[in-house]
Amino acid sequence: MTWQYQDLIDEFYLDVEKYKNEYYSHDEAINITFNEFYSENIVDEMERALIYILYAELSLQNPRIYNKTKQVLLHELESIDLNRIRSQIIDGQLNQEQFEEISIRKDEVIKKLKLMPIDSCNQARWYYTEIRNAVSNFYLELVAQNMDRDEIIDQVLSRYKRGCDRTPSVKITVYITLAEILLKNNQTISKKIIDEISGFKMDSINEELSLDELTDLSRAVKNVLE
């Protein structure tokens, strides 16, 4: 299949949103989409360039990036052959304006990627603030539907079960965020949630959280269990 410039961009974004609507994290969604679009057998330079540029641009929305991933991306982006892409204008895959855009986007994403903080964990996952915001927003949606406490707890834990099963940091963050929200709204925290929080071992998180995130999580756990 020969991609047109804008069609590839649109399809890439659509697939990312599709996975996010299935409750994958942003990082998981862009990684799944990249793996579906990319192949080492790609000979179309515009296609290869756009896939890497889009993946890198969307990765910038994460708070940090695994060092090996960062180095691979920088290498691939810097190796994009703009002369080959320019020659594809004749084939109608892109126009002059789009060629200039891809050149600018390449340079911009390289510049920003070089400044991106390093993540010690290489696993695609929900990041700390991302999952806390997601749980909080979902809670408000459920309250608007007049669900009671137990229904809300079941719905939240069901939606984010995949993330909880994948990484310990996501699991404890989902539980602690839910517990804090219940307390804030003068509701009793269920025994199930308390047991999960009190039995959680902080050392199981490994390198999934930054020091600031770990400090905030520890504070939240202490406040909930007091």
Image (tube, helix red, strand yellow):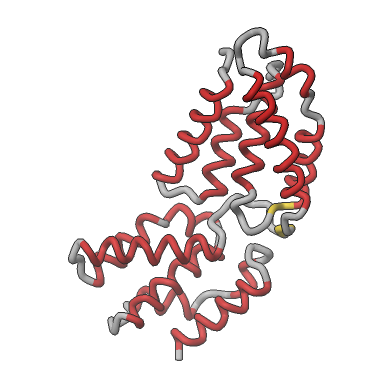
Q: Is residue 10 above or below residue 152?
A: above
User: In the depicted view, which residue is nearer to us: 172 or 35?
Assistant: 35
Q: Residue furthest left?
A: 146
Asked which quadrant contains residue 103, the reply is: top right
- Which quarter of the rendering shows the N terminus? top right
User: In the depicted view, which residue is nearer to us: 33 or 12?
Assistant: 12
In the visual, does 172 lie left or right of 213? left
Q: Residue at x 62, y 74 (%)?
A: 214
In the visual, does 146 lie left or right of 121? left
User: In the depicted view, which residue is nearer to us: 166 or 30?
Assistant: 30
Q: Residue at x 61, y 54 (%)?
A: 62
Q: Is residue 109 above or below residue 198?
A: above
Q: Residue furthest front?
A: 97
Q: Is residue 113 above or below residue 157?
A: above
- Which quarter of the rendering shows the C terminus? bottom left
Rendering coords of residue 17 (x, y %): 45, 41
Rendering coords of residue 109 (x, y %): 70, 43
Asked which quadrant contains residue 54, the reply is: top right
Q: Residue at x 51, y 60 (%)?
A: 130
User: In the depicted view, which residue is nearer to us: 203 or 216?
Assistant: 216
In the visual, does 189 lie left or right of 59? left
Rendering coords of residue 149 (x, y %): 25, 72
Q: Residue at x 51, y 86 (%)?
A: 222
Q: Residue furthest top?
A: 91
Q: Is residue 197 above or below residue 145?
A: below
